[in-house]
Structures are given as structure tokens and as C-alpha cells.
Image (tube, helix red, strand yellow):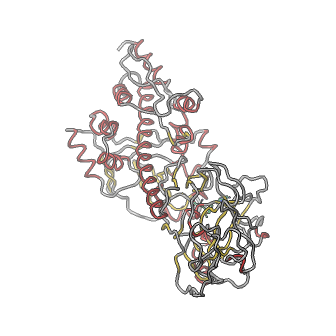
Amino acid sequence: MSDTSEKLQEQEVMNLDFTEVAQSLHEPNSSQVTNNIEPEDHSQTSCTAKRYKLDKNIEASTSIVTLHSIHTSGTKESNDIDSEEETIEQIDNGISEPLHDTAILIMSVVLKDIDHALYNFILSDKRALKYILSGKVLNLETEMTDYQKDNPYDLKEIDEIVDHVIIFGVRFYLVKWKNWSKGFCTWECFNDICNSQHLLGDNVKDKTNDSKQLRKIDGMHIILSRRFVSKMFNLFRTEDGLALPTISIEDLSGLFDNINIGCEMRQMAFKRNLDSYLGVISLNCFQYIQSNELKQWEITINVLSNSYNIKVENNMDLEGPPDTIVYATKYIYGKNVNISNDLVIGCECTDNCKNSTKCCNERVGYSRLYDSNKCIIVDPGYPIFECNKNCKCNTDCYNRVVQLGSTVRISIYKTEKCGWGVKASEYIEKGRFIALYTGKIITIEESKTRLKENASLSEYMWNLDFDDKHNYEYIIDGSKYANFTRFINHSCNSNLNVYTVRINCLDKTLPELALFASKNILTGEQLTVNYFFGSNKNKIGKKTGIRCLCNEKNCQGYYF
Ligand SMILES: C[S@@+](CC[C@H](N)C(=O)[O-])C[C@H]1O[C@@H](n2cnc3c(N)ncnc32)[C@H](O)[C@@H]1O
């Protein structure tokens, strides 16, 4: 190869830039979202890599480890590839224990279902396999980059160290992050966590000091750190989701063609790019699985809710659906909950309760509840008595709203800082019924026992003391059994109010809790409730609780 063509190729490698690609994604005139990396004309050279330089931060924050076999007795490197078939078989058979974050696992899962050209290419191209199976630890930075220094992991965010392995002398931890489901544990390098935190807390130390034997890991593992994932999401997030740059087989093939050609610097640059490309491909793979899982859960909860109003989306990270909850559209009654069977008396209205002064709510001494659009017109704190099974009216009645179920279009989505949240997928008029807060009804005693075991459950518990602060018996616990309202976050300037509702059960101690819009809510706006609604407001502002991230002007700073 001539010096000139080598120089040209070097320039091409140095010009690969994901940040540029990401910027063009967000430019108003960018006509394409997913396929906006068009290769330059490479006819002058043999290199088919595109003209974009990978962002330095991305490279540095990506820990890509490729390996073949690690056994308890040590490591076994495999550089010999006799035949493609044999190697593919080796990999497939090598998955003894599925790990969520292993690229090879994903590849076999994906490959079974779809014909994905890139993965097929990786698994069928001899050079690709040789590279991947060469058993090298690639791009492992022990020094933190400026980006990492500015964005340290917060030790408080670590919920649990689920597992750890040592790969070629480098210790990796499988981290379960707080407020992230187990489906999105990420492998993080010891130095990374340690450096970021300066000191590992006792909590983490204890969990990692056990003398667990090294688990046998076979196959190829591409490890994506959470930082890499966040960085990529920040770069490639669009309103419609993550639009990762398209990588063609020619790109990959071009990099493989060139990794062993030219001076050392040039080879290293190509390898770095190749690693980042593998990272993106892997991310793409995770995302494919994630979107399938989100869709599946979305269908399930819509079927259970008998509606098509709920969307589930995650444009923030790779976490799959928050499916650790059991979707419950009604109360589930726990042990020792006694429901009194007081007879409900029906109304005799003949005008579908439009103008009657003797309808269910009026009869117990209160005024009209809903306007002609079925929006609530009474202040929060007002108990609601809707028409019931013994009333003469039909379902068109003006006093039947909550019992007809939720009709608002909403989206369960991943917020930037507060985990999952709920936002409006349509304009919601002030006073409109949103949904019932469902969950398991438990006694006060049981709630105390549960809270002793796990104090954070209090955030999912509502005391049924709205009508009577002193004589209440039960609590709704939405931590396990719940509907979408369980994902509604707290705000000091909330847009929802809570009301107690009685329909076919007049038991004083067991009202249902209904959420209504307290203001007009725009499409895309997050639905929020004040977690202290109806309780002693002095609690707010006690600087002992959880830091509130609602970002409102009147934010109290802390809650709980
Ligand atoms: C009832 S849950 C709401 C759903 C929750 N975001 C999730 O992902 O499951 C309460 C939790 O949401 C988060 N959260 C809700 N509102 C918040 C706020 N204003 N500031 C900070 N965190 C909040 C906290 O992590 C809290 O533990």
C-alpha cells in the first residue's frame, strides 16, 4: 500500500465522529433520522469505513471486553479457528448460565427470531470471529477521563452488587441500580466505581468481599457500562425513541479489513473504532429486545385494563418494563380486611340524574359532583357518592364517572431523574377523571410490619384516612399490586387531586381513591400528585427525607 493511500485511510479513521452524527439528528433540516450516516465516496481507497470520528468520551467510557472462555481454574484463550461452523457451535454451546448483559446471548436470541444482517455477519465472518474470540480486553481505561470525572457514579445509586467476575485480571461488578429493574443491571469495572466514589462504602464492600468462586463464563461478552449507555442515549435520543447510527456490513467489514494494516497508531485507531462499533451494535441488540419487551407489557396491561389507552415508552435507558408489579385494576383485599355489607340505597331519578336534587350525593347532604362533561366540580376533600347498582338510572347517568373506568390516554415513561413516571398522551381538561389508585388493602398492623422490613414502601402506601383522620383501619399498598397510577411521581406543584369515592360499598373504612386533574394538562405533561395530599403538611420541608426533584418554583426541597 502506498504512503498516500495509508495517509488517506488514517484521515478517514480520524474523521469518524458520532457527536457530529448525533448533531445532524437534531438539526431541523435533517430529513432522515435513522439512516443519516451516508458513507463518503471511498472510491479512492480500499477502506469502506465512514467518515466519522467516534467521540472520545464514548470511546473512553466504553468497556468492551471480548473473550472466549474463562474457567475457575484460569483463562483459556482461543485464537485458532478451524472452521466457522465449529466456532459458532462453540459459542452457542458455551452459554451455560444466561447473563442479561452478554452480547452473545443476545445474538443467539435475536438470531433465532430475525434475520439480522449485522449479527449474521459477525457470526459468519472469519475475521470478525477471530477478532472477537482473540480473548483480549479492549479499551479498558484505568484512568478516568474528564467526562467520567465530571459524571461520577453516585454510590447511593447502587442498590446491590449482584455478581462479580474477574476477566483477565480486571474485576467487574454486576450492579443493580436503585429504581432500575433487575433487567437493567450493568457490568461495571471496579476502578470505575471505586474511582468515582473514592471509597467503596461498607455496604458494597461487604457484598463484594465474599469468596465466591469465579463463575465459569463461556462465549463472547460485550460489556456496556451504564455510562456508555447513557451517553449514547443522550446523543441519539429523538422524540420517537433512540435513533442509533446505522452501521452497515461494509463499515464493519472495512474496519476488519484494516485493523492489521499500517502503522501501530493507525491500527489502534481502527481497533478503537471497531470496538465502539461493536458497542453500538450490542446496544442496538439490547434495544431491540427492550422494545419488544416494552410492547409485550404494554399489550398485557391494556388487555388487563380493557383499554387501548396506555403506552409504555423508555427513551432514557435500556431498562425493560417495570414488570415486577402485578397489574391490578381493582383493590386486592389482604388478610383481616373485613368489608361491611351495608345495603346501598339507590336513587329514583328519572332524568339520568341530570338536574335531580335527590340523587345519591345530594341525598347524603352534598352538592352535585360532576358537570355535563363529567368533570369534577367539587373541591378535594369532598366525599363522592356515585350512583350504584340499586339506582334506577343507567350508565349514561351524570353521576357515574369513576365506575365507568379510566378513559384518558396516558403513557408510562422513563423520566430523566425520577424513574418511571406517567404523562398525558392527550390534552386533559381540569376535573377529568384519571384513574383509581389500586393496590392491596392491608391493615395498619400489617403495614407497620412491612415498613419495618422496608421503609421505602411507604412511598406506595396511602392511608385510607381521608374522611376520618382518627378512625381509619386500612392502607392501600401499591408496591406490588397496582395499576399505572403507582408510577405517578410526586410534585410540590402537582396537577392531580385525590378524592374518596363510594359506589356499591358504603363501608366508611374502605373508600376507593380516585385521581382527578386539578388543572388543564397539556399533551406530554407529566401527571403528578402531592404525596402529602390530605396529610399533615408540616412533614414537608423536614430536611430528613428524600430530596425532591420536581423542579417546581415552590418545591419544598424534600419529601418523606
Ligand atoms: C410511588 S413511586 C413513583 C414511581 C417511581 N418513579 C418508579 O419508577 O417506580 C415513588 C418513587 O419515585 C421517585 N420519585 C417520585 N417523585 C419524586 C420526586 N419529586 N423527586 C425525586 N424522586 C421522586 C422516588 O424514587 C420514589 O421512591
Compared to residue 478, the image places residue 145 above or below, namely above
Q: Is residue 147 left or right of residue 115?
A: right
Q: Which quarter of the rendering shows the N terminus?
A: top left
Residue 68 visible in rendering: no
**Which quadrant of the frame does ligand 1 lie within?**
bottom right
Q: Toward which corner of the image does residue 470 lie, by quadrant?
A: bottom right
Residue plotted at (31% across, 51% down) = 218
Compared to residue 85, the image places residue 274 above or below, namely above
**Total marks placed:** 0
The x and y percentages for residue 161 are 50, 60
Q: Which quarter of the rendering shows the C terminus?
A: bottom right
Among all residues in the image, which is located at the extreme front?
350
Residue plotted at (38% across, 58% down) = 214
Q: Is residue 83 left or right of residue 407?
A: left
Residue plotted at (69% across, 60% down) = 431
142 or 317: nearer the viewer: 317
